[in-house]
Amino acid sequence: MSRFNRSPSVEYSSFLREVREYADADHEPGEGVCRAIADALEADLKKRFRAYWSVEEPADGPACIRRVITGDDECNCTSTRSWIDREHERIGARDKPPHKPPYSDHATLWLDDGDPVLYSIHIYGPEVEVVSKTAAPEGERRRNGWFDLISFAEHWGLEIGITPFSWYNAFSTINVVFYSPEWARQKGGSE
Ligand SMILES: [Zn+2]
């Protein structure tokens, strides 16, 4: 019996026992139980993510959130941005649709029927972020990044979501997504 299963099968119980034994044993650095499970489940978690958000394919080329904001078919991201622009992007402070959300890491742009609709990132807890003077005025360099992420979504008219399955590095990264509200409404209406 466990908290999740009152009458577990033999197979379930023996798997649980094996995982617990692995968790209690000593391992090489980087081979702890959470890493091992994250490693084993990467493809499964990605599949769950796709099913949960109803997205199929990642876009070719650089993952760009401007395309979710504007609906553009493409973007020439890498060639057009200065260091200053990128620093401003880091906290979401820009007056034009940016190419990246704040604290973006391990980003993927997802398509639905060829349209750019959802942008996913996998971030390590953004509660304490320290940014450059260029990115933020004096006194605001140490930031709780969640506020920047939420303000960013509000400012650009995007929905923000957090799912409990980061396939990139489960148990270490948090999966945050931004998506188009129009697309979400259409999806909701068609189901
Ligand atoms: Zn771009």
Image: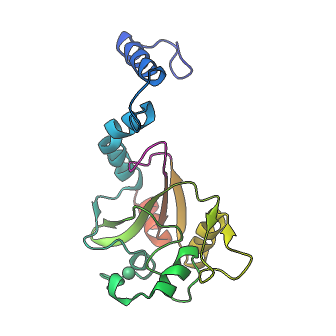
Residue drawn at x 41%, y 47% as measured from the top left: 169
Q: With respect to residue 175, does 131 lie above or below?
A: below
Q: In this view of the protein, which residue sits in the foreground, 36 or 118?
A: 36
Q: Is residue 71 visible?
A: no
Q: Is residue 122 left or right of residue 139?
A: left
Q: Quadrant of the C terminus?
A: bottom left
Left or right: 187, with 129 as reference point: left
Q: Check the image and report above or below for 9 versus 24.
A: above
| Majority SS type along the magenta span | loop
* Residue 17 makes an appearance in the image: yes
The image shows residue 105, relative to residue 24, as above or below, that is: below
Name the residue nearer the viewer: 120 or 172. 172
Residue lying at 43% horizontally and 68% vertically, measured from the top left = 183
Q: Residue 81 placed where, x, y %?
A: 41, 87
Left or right of residue 159, residue 10 in this image: left
Residue 154 versus residue 51 in the image, above or below: below
Q: Is residue 139 magenta?
A: no
Which region is colored magenta? 164-173
Quarter assignment of residue 150? bottom right
In which image quadrant can residue 120 be found? bottom left
> How many marks are shown on the rendered structure?
0
Q: Residue 79: which quarter of the image?
A: bottom left
Q: Residue furthest front?
A: 28
Q: Position of residue 13 (x, y in %)?
A: 42, 13
Most extreme residue toward the right, as rendered?
139
Whole-percent x, y for residue 47 in the image: 32, 47
- x, y percent for residue 172: 49, 46
The image quadrant in which ligand 1 is located? bottom left
